[in-house]
Image (tube, rainbow, N blue to C red):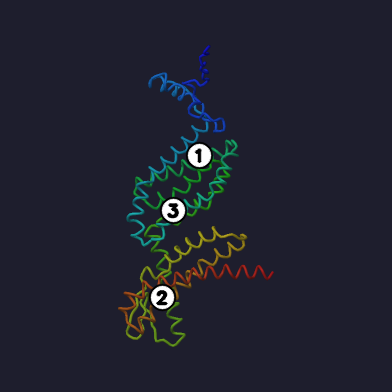
């Protein structure tokens, strides 16, 4: 007698949502995804969309979507200003170091992502703190919109700092605002100063450099005379223009040095010592550059000094400033080891 083979009934349901994830070792999928997967082969598109809209999304998803929406809106608001700065404004005032400030600031913020994630998970509700940060962001945004209507790029760019502090503190807490304090403050180096402020600062600096150069070369026996910003030496004259004030070299070295000081490890005393050496190094470096330009003009000629050496000396002096900053750091470490 032939006994027919009985087929085993399959326990797998065709419309079961876990058909897409048969292994129990896989991570648990979201309930909304399970619900959609279970209805896909049975119901139509309209019914599925109705169920999706009625399904309560978790609070974290709503918060993340709202946060990304806020940052995207801020980007749209500042996009015209950033476009103007990168295309013409910084180049017009010879503020070329500012092109790298925003990427460096974003990189510093990205390196703090683990601390930010921990701070966001530990956030606590504080009404007074939230109101303060919200007021700070709204005030910064109001100033930015008003300055944008008046075409005042300096104030629009400067208002970005209180907006960022306010939004970070309001959305992620005061601890996150403290973590991102330096990356946000570092954006100060990308704020283009008004031309009136540049002239107010650079004219006294140019006079100071011209007087120091005159006394220095006269001490070594050179027959140099000065009339205002003009230096005369053996029939040659050198005019100290705006680039000879040392203002831009000071800002450039400060931006580079601040980033290096923030990135390097060590006690706060070491960092404050290096920060205090930035301005003297920039002033000394600019003074040496002006003296060397005057000497090259005297021995080689004004054509060579203005065409080639003027730009080349700027690069050399910049390397000198970087080496000086590293030397200050080395001296501090050696002194600390002796103690």
Q: Residue furthest left?
A: 303
The disc placed on residue 134 is: 1
Given residues 146 and 184, the one toward you in this image is 184
Q: Position of residue 81 (x, y in %)?
A: 36, 49
Q: Position of residue 30 (x, y in %)?
A: 51, 29
The disc placed on residue 150 is: none
SS at mark 2? helix
SS at mark 3? helix
Residue visible at 57% across and 67% down in the picture: 329
Residue visible at 49% across and 27% down in the picture: 57
Q: Disc 1 and disc 2: Cα gap in Å? A: 49 Å
Q: Residue furthest right?
A: 339
SS at mark 1? helix
Residue visible at 51% across and 21% down in the picture: 12
Q: Badges 3 and 1: C-beta atoms under 8 Å apart?
A: no
Q: Which residue is mark 3?
A: 103
* Above or below for 322 versus 11: below
Query: Which mark sits nearer the N-terminus, 1 or 2?
Result: 1
Label 2: few (<14), some (14–19) or many (≥20) C-alpha neighbours in 10 Å: many
Q: Which residue is mark 2?
A: 290
Given residues 30 and 251, the one toward you in this image is 30
- Displayed quadrant of residue 149: top left
Mark in the foreground, 3 or 1: 3
Q: Disc 3 and disc 1: Cα gap in Å? A: 26 Å
Q: In this rendering, would 154 be left or right of 321? A: left
Q: Disc 2 and disc 3: Cα gap in Å? A: 32 Å
């Amino acid at each position: 007698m032939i006994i027919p083979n009985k087929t085993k009934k399959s326990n797998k349901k065709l419309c079961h949502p876990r058909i897409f994830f048969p292994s129990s070792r896989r991570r648990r999928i979201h309930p909304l995804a399970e619900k959609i997967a279970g209805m896909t082969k049975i119901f139509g598109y309209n019914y599925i969309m109705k169920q999706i809209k009625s399904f309560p999304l978790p609070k974290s998803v709503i918060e993340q979507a709202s946060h990304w929406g806020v940052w995207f809106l801020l980007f749209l608001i500042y996009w015209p200003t950033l476009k103007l700065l990168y295309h013409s404004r910084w180049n017009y005032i010879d503020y070329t170091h500012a092109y790298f400030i925003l990427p460096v600031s974003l990189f510093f913020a990205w390196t703090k992502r683990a601390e930010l994630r921990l701070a966001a998970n530990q956030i606590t509700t504080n009404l007074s703190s939230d109101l303060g940060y919200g007021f700070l962001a709204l005030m910064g945004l109001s100033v930015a919109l008003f300055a944008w209507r008046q075409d005042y790029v300096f104030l629009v760019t400067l208002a970005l700092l209180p907006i960022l502090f306010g939004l970070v503190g309001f959305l992620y807490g005061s601890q996150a605002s403290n973590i991102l304090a330096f990356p946000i403050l570092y954006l100060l180096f990308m704020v283009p100063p008004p031309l009136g402020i540049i002239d107010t600062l650079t004219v006294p600096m140019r006079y100071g450099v011209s007087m120091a150069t005159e006394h220095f070369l006269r001490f070594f026996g050179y027959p140099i005379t000065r009339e205002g910003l003009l230096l005369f030496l053996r029939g040659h004259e050198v005019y100290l223009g705006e680039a000879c004030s040392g203002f831009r070299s000071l800002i450039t070295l400060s931006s580079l040095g601040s980033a290096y000081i923030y990135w390097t490890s060590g006690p706060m005393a070491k960092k404050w010592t290096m920060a205090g050496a930035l301005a003297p190094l920039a002033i000394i470096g600019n003074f040496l550059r002006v003296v060397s330009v005057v000497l090259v003009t005297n021995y080689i000629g004004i054509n060579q000094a203005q065409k080639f050496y003027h730009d080349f000396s700027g690069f050399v002096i910049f390397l000198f400033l970087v080496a000086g900053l590293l030397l200050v750091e080395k001296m501090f470490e050696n002194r600390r080891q002796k103690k």
